[in-house]
Each structure stands twice: as C-alpha cells, then as structure tokens.
Amino acid sequence: MSDRTPAGQFFDAAIGLLQRVRDEEADAITAAGTLLADTVADGGRLFAFGAGHSSLAAQDVVYRAGGLALMNLLAVPGAVGVDVMPATLGSALERVDGLAAAVLDSSPIRSGDALVIVSLSGRNALPVEMALNARALGIRVIGVTSVAYATQTTSRHVSGTYLKDHCDIVLDSKIAVGDAELTLDTVPAPFAPASTVVTSALMQAMVATAAGALADRGIEPPLLRSGNVDGGHDWNARVFDQYADRIFYRR
C-alpha cells in the first residue's frame, strides 16, 4: 500500500527523481566522471562551486570520507550556504556582474583544472559568468543544473544565457521549476524541495565514476577515509602528503 502521508509522498517523489537521473543521465555522469579522472591523471586539480543551497552539494564532495582528496571548494564569501547575515545577501550576490571573474582571478584554479558548478536554476549572473570565464581560462566545466529553468524562466545574465550553455558537460537534475515536490489543498504554497537530495546524488555518482575510471587505468584514486575508523588519519596523512600541491583546503 502506498504511503500517502506528506513524508511518504516526498520519499516517492525523491526516489522517482533519483531513478530518472540514474537512467536518463547515465551517459552524462560517465562523461563527467571520466573528465574528472582525466584531470587527475594529467596532474590537474578539481574544484566545486555552488551558491546558496546549491553550495550544499558542492561542499558534500570536498574533504569527504570516501571522496576524492583533490576536490577543492571554490568559495565566494557571502554566497556559500546561508551562514551570512542576512541570508538574503547571498541571493543578491548571485546576481552581481563581475564577481565570478574576481573570484577566479584570486583563486588557485588554472588552465587544465576541472570545475564543477552547481546551480539549480543556472539563470543567475554568478554561475553563468563562472562557467564563461573558467572556460576562457582553459578550465573544463561540468554544470549540475535543472535544464527546465532554461525554458521556463528568464536568464538574469546580460547575455540571456544559462549555465548549461557554457559547460563541457551538463548533468540535468530534472528538478521542476520552483523546487517543491508537494502540494496540498490545505497548504497555500508548494513545499518539500528535493534538489539537494538529487544534486548530491549526481555529484557522488560522478565522483564514484571518476574513482572507478582511475582504478581501471591502474591509478590509485586519491580517496580519503573517515577519521572515525582506525587508521583513517594515517591514511589521509599519506594522501595529503602525496598530493600536497593539489589540495588547497588545508592551507
């Protein structure tokens, strides 16, 4: 029997979306994971960026047990998460022209690196310019976004384009415009967003693909282990030492 409680309906919606991205984005996930593996094998570095709640999925693959040690967070002060006060400032910063160029210019990212940009709508100036400027610098860009926004909303970038238009590879989260899976006659607004669940799953699937691709080439993936298991800290210390010049979150 189907669970028709709000919780049950949300789980059904999230599971349905996960099944869709697993099946419909399989080729793109393989391509994205392969791009990350190529970058690691060629001596490049990995970076992830997201603003607002999109930053949650980006942060989830940085300094992560079971994740690639070379994934670094490309942070924009005030736009990463909702820790800035007021929280609405972060949303405003996403619409500021020129901010992405300043961030890239002052970051360690360089030609030959790979950058994963997470933006649910992909319509704001910050992620669009981040992708545009990164590719101009010779950086490969993977976009994780909902393609639906490009057909149902207006771009906030002067070019009229979206994140998806400036990426080497796009992973489509399939999230509906508005990011709310449930409606009830007794509730005046849609509710229960699933973008973090689905986007984080896409990110982890991509990283898993990269690890597997490196292993297939005879390269030990630079993975971190949990510090809460015996030997975890020693394992991570070895990885940090081996890849010290490609890890920036320890400096």
Image: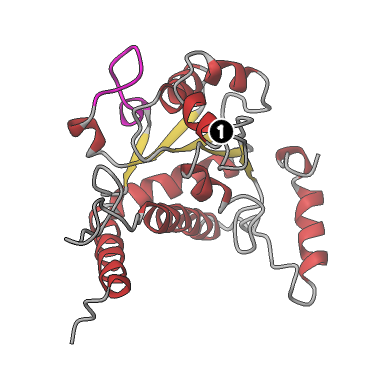
Magenta span contains residue 218: no
Q: Horizontal placement of 117 versus 14: left or right?
A: right
Circle 1 residues within 10 Å: few <14, some 14–19, many ≥20: many
Q: Horizontal placement of 43 versus 10: left or right?
A: right
Q: Decide if residue 37 is in sight here.
A: no
Mainly helix, strand or loop, the magenta region?
loop
Secondary element at tag 1: loop
Which quarter of the picture shows residue 66? bottom right
In the depicted structure, whether residue 249 falls above or below residue 19: above
Which quarter of the picture shows residue 164? top left
In the depicted structure, whether residue 58 falls above or below residue 230: above
In the depicted structure, whether residue 2 falls above or below residue 94: below
Which quarter of the picture shows residue 231? bottom right
Q: Position of residue 238 (x, y in %)?
A: 80, 58
Q: Position of residue 75 (x, y in %)?
A: 62, 34
- Its colouring scheme is secondary structure
Quadrant location, the C terminus? top right
Quadrant location, the N terminus? bottom left
Identify residue type, mark 1.
Answer: Ala
Q: Which residue corresponds to mark 1? A: 79
Rendered residue at 25%/64% (across/down): 13
Q: Position of residue 245 (x, y in %)?
A: 76, 38
Rendered residue at 59%/22% (across/down): 104
Seen from the viewer's position, the closer of residues 116 and 111 is 116
Q: Position of residue 130 (x, y in %)?
A: 48, 24
Region in magenta? 154-166
Q: Horizontal placement of 186 versus 248: left or right?
A: left
